[in-house]
Amino acid sequence: MMSNLSRHIAELSRLVAATAGALDLASIRIVEVSASDFDASGRPLVDDEALQSVEAYAERFDVLLASGYAWLNLSYLGRLRDWQLVAVELPAQRAERATATAVNYSGVSHAVRADGGNVDAWIARRPRAGGST
């Protein structure tokens, strides 16, 4: 049976296919970001050790869908090494009366496309414990 996350990734893949090519479930890595997970330049903070496969993140995605958020953004950020990086962006707060969570889709930015789809310059690495990156 296909997970909710897999179904949403398939929809995102249809959206980005014309500009970024098809997404491959096996090469996708998920990063979860909230409003506080951006640097001063507006780049999402990414911790390589926190990246998860679609399969590993599917249960967490179901929890988020049932958590009272009015929306979640599912954004294809671009390529990071051999991975296709997808962000699950959370709103700053839960809605008071959300009966269902809308999932919005976003494709790769023009800047990343102009950089050949490589997202490395357009994200910020979250420092690891001990200060190294």
Image: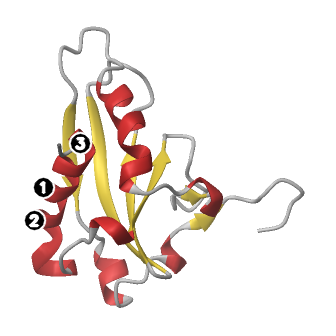
Expressed as whole percent of the image width and height from the top left, the position of residue 21 reads: 19, 80
Indicate whether 124 appears above or below 81. above
- Spatial separation of the CA atoms under disc 2 and disc 3: 17 Å
Expressed as whole percent of the image width and height from the top left, the position of residue 109 reads: 30, 71
Q: Amino acid at mark 2?
A: Arg
In screen coordinates, is 116 left or right of 33? left
Q: Secondary structure at mark 1?
A: helix
In screen coordinates, is 12 left or right of 92? left
Expressed as whole percent of the image width and height from the top left, the position of residue 114 reads: 32, 88
The residue nearer to you, when weighing 87 against 62, is 62
Query: Which mark's residue is nearer the viewer, 2 or 3?
Result: 3
In the picture as drawn, the residue positioned furthest to the right comes out as: 130
* Mark 2 Cα-neighbour bin, 10 Å: few <14, some 14–19, many ≥20: few
* Mark 3 Cα-neighbour bin, 10 Å: few <14, some 14–19, many ≥20: some
- Spatial separation of the CA atoms under disc 1 and disc 2: 5 Å
- Residue drawn at x 30%, y 83% as measured from the top left: 113
Query: Mark 3 highlights which residue?
Result: 3
Query: Mark 1 highlights which residue?
Result: 11
- Residue drawn at x 35%, y 83% as measured from the top left: 117
Q: Is the residue under label 3 in contact with that under label 2 (CB below 8 Å)?
A: no
Q: Amino acid at mark 3?
A: Ser
Q: Amino acid at mark 1?
A: Glu
Q: Is the residue under label 2 in contact with that under label 1 (CB below 8 Å)?
A: yes
Query: Mark 2 highlights which residue?
Result: 14
Indicate whether 1 appears above or below 124. above
